């Protein structure tokens, strides 16, 4: 064991407990953020996505389950306790045949959620992310007219060759044309929402084209309020994806863990009702419950999640590889202090 690893092993439990005590003194009555997977089906095979190892069933969320979730979330939206609801997770939401209906009902049932969208610097309110491969004129107009407050459009790179290194099964020219058509519709009838984000994942392959990518979209974004290009950092999904051609493997395994907070404010619900540990939990296989069988609040305060929170608060991640290998809870300031100490 290296000196750094030994130091981390000795100090991590103490630091984790102190951090937890300072930041998460009281559990919220209900999650502040919810990821609701409208469908777990997808039409692409993206190299940077862990969906290739997904073992749970690929399916669309039934309307009855979605409406049940809305009923439960609405009770807390009335108390202004919900900041974020996303209708995507590991599937392509435009594959769901009733997506626009889902959005309409969510907007009607969760009126307070829409106000969160005014925080433009963050992703808040009713949100959706799509690979834009299926974004025809009807869907584009429907999304712009929907209650969405934030719409993410994934367009990686500025050339077909670069796009192909990221998203197998997609055609760059078609995706770009779909996005351009949506932006043209948005320019024709400016509206307050949704915020439109053209998203590019920064990797070894896309990095050389970032300048060209920004220049390409600047002319299409002109005249559209609250539209922008967002550069997303590459993630290996807590060690679930290894693509050295896209990004060098993450070697930073020993720097100190601090509670990421997801278990205290976020719940992810799959298309079949399965509840995940967090948005990185592609298989939702930790036995936390099923929202089609158990109320969300009962799952939120249930024994499995409570036990996991206790382990996180103590920094005990040995038997939780998803958490142990995740960057979200590993804070760079503490690693920086370690490196400063070594100089």
Image (cartoon, helix red, strand yellow):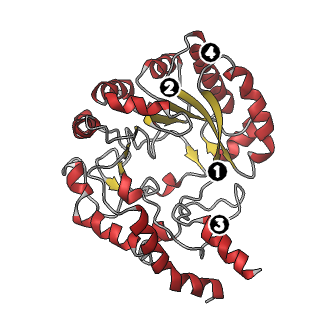
State the CA–CA distance, disc 1 to disc 2.
Answer: 23 Å
- Residue at image mark 3: 250
CB within 8 Å, label 4 to label 3: no
User: What is the distance, in whole Å, between disc 4 and disc 1 at their CAs?
Assistant: 28 Å
Q: Which mark is residue 233?
A: 1
> Upstream in the sequence, badge 2 or badge 3?
2
Task: Say left or right for 294 vs 170.
Answer: left
Q: Position of residue 242 (x, y in %)?
A: 62, 62
Along the line of sight, the residue nearer the viewer: 260 or 50: 260
Residue at 67% from the left image edge and 32% from the top image edge? 172
Instruction: Name the residue tied to disc 4.
Output: 184
Q: Pointer 2: what residue?
A: 194
User: Judging from the image, what secondary structure is the residue with disc 1 in?
Assistant: strand
Q: Front-most of 89 and 175? A: 89
Question: At 64% across and 83% down in the image, what residue appears?
Answer: 4
On the image, the x and y values in percent for residue 162 come to 74, 42
Whichever of labels 4 and 3 marks the residue nearer the N terminus, that label is 4
């Amino acid at each position: 064991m290296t000196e750094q690893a030994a130091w981390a092993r000795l100090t991590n439990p103490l630091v984790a407990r102190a951090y937890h005590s300072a930041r998460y003194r009281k559990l919220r009555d209900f999650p502040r953020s919810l990821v609701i997977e409208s469908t777990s089906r997808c039409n692409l095979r993206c190299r940077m996505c862990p969906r290739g190892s997904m073992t749970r069933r690929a399916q669309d969320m039934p309307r009855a389950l979605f409406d049940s979730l809305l009923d439960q979330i609405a009770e807390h939206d009335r108390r202004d306790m919900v900041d974020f609801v996303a209708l995507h997770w590991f599937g392509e939401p435009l594959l769901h045949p009733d997506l626009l209906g889902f959005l309409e009902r969510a907007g009607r049932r969760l009126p307070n959620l829409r106000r969160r969208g005014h925080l433009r610097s963050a992703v808040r309110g009713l949100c959706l992310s799509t690979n834009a491969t299926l974004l025809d004129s009807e869907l584009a107009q429907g999304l712009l007219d929907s209650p969405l407050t934030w719409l993410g459009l994934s367009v990686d790179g500025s050339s077909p060759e670069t796009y192909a290194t990221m998203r197998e099964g997609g055609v760059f020219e078609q995706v770009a044309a779909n996005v351009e058509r949506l932006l043209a519709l948005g320019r024709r009838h400016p509206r307050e929402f949704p915020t439109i984000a053209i998203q590019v994942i920064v990797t070894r392959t896309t990095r050389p084209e970032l300048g060209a990518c920004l220049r390409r979209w600047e002319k299409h974004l002109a005249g559209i309020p609250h539209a922008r290009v967002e550069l997303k950092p590459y993630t290996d999904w807590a060690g679930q994806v290894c693509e050295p051609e896209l990004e060098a493997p993450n070697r930073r395994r020993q720097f100190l863990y601090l509670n990421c907070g997801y278990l205290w404010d976020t719940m992810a619900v799959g298309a079949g009702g399965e509840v995940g540990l967090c948005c990185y939990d592609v298989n939702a296989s930790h036995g936390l419950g099923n929202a089609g069988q158990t109320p969300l609040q009962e799952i939120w305060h249930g024994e499995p999640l409570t036990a996991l929170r206790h382990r996180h608060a103590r920094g005990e991640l040995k038997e939780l590889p998803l958490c142990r290998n995740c960057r979200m809870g590993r804070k760079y300031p503490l690693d920086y202090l370690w490196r400063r100490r070594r100089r």
